[in-house]
Amino acid sequence: MGYCTGLDGSIYDYFTKFYRFGFLPKRHEGRVIRKLKKLAEDVDLICMLEVKSGQFEKIQGDWYGDVENKYGVGSLLRYLLFTRENCNGFISKKKVPFKKHFLKNGTKKLLYEIEMPGGTKLVFAHFSLNSKVRRKQFGEINKMFDGSRIVCGDFNIFKGVEEVKPLVESGLQVVSEEPTFPACSPRKPLDLFLCSKDLECEVEVLNEVLSDHSAVLLTTKLS
């Protein structure tokens, strides 16, 4: 969600609109939220990264969901003025069982686990910018989950999709390598869905610009 700043990932936007991270005019925030709600009309579940707790409340409406600070329990970043509202969260049209985990490695430690129909687990996180830390995080996930599962989020794999090899070796497959960043002219496939091979999944990168990353839509049938 990019904290609903509406920046499109271009160098121009980063330099001329950076102030929105400290002071975000309501009209820009509202425009992003309206776009998301429009996209949400035909989906069942939305996973959101980089959303303020107050913004989440405006988005959620009558949907079921949860929001949580993305930093580790006990982290100073949970209490500082400019980071204490930095969250990840999800909303769902139906009530779904879920758990919140905190990874041992990285600064952004929050990992959501959502129980989907048929026992499939949907796992999503905002992974580290450090490649060595990311690899450790992928290893943690491999130890935590087995069976039918979907792993998604912002993987920050600037070196390429080969970085998710540890997850692929655990029995997952990358559904699409279509680029998602920057949203204004996507060149890097940072936002992925990795799914168990028993699942039939289709992925579409959406053209509507919500933030500096393009939104990604997964379609699958679960028993």
Image (cartoon, helix red, strand yellow):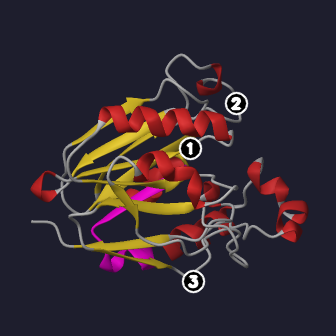
Q: State the residue at coordinates (41%, 73%).
A: 217
Instruction: Please identify the quadrant where the C terminus is shown.
Output: bottom left
Q: Quick check: 67 left or right of 135?
A: left
Q: Residue 127 carries which label?
A: 1
Q: State the residue at coordinates (52%, 76%).
A: 35
Question: Dot 2: what SS?
Answer: loop
Residue bearing mark 3: 207
In this picture, which residue range is highlighted in magenta? 37-50
State which quadrant residue 139 falls in: top left
Q: State the residue at coordinates (46%, 29%).
A: 103
Name the residue at the top extreme: 74
Q: Quick check: 10 left or right of 145?
A: right
Residue bearing mark 2: 81
Label 3 vs label 1, nearer the camera: 1
Task: Give, as a three-letter code, the residue at label 2.
Answer: Leu
Rounded to the nearest whole Å, what is the CA distance between mark 2 and mark 1? 22 Å
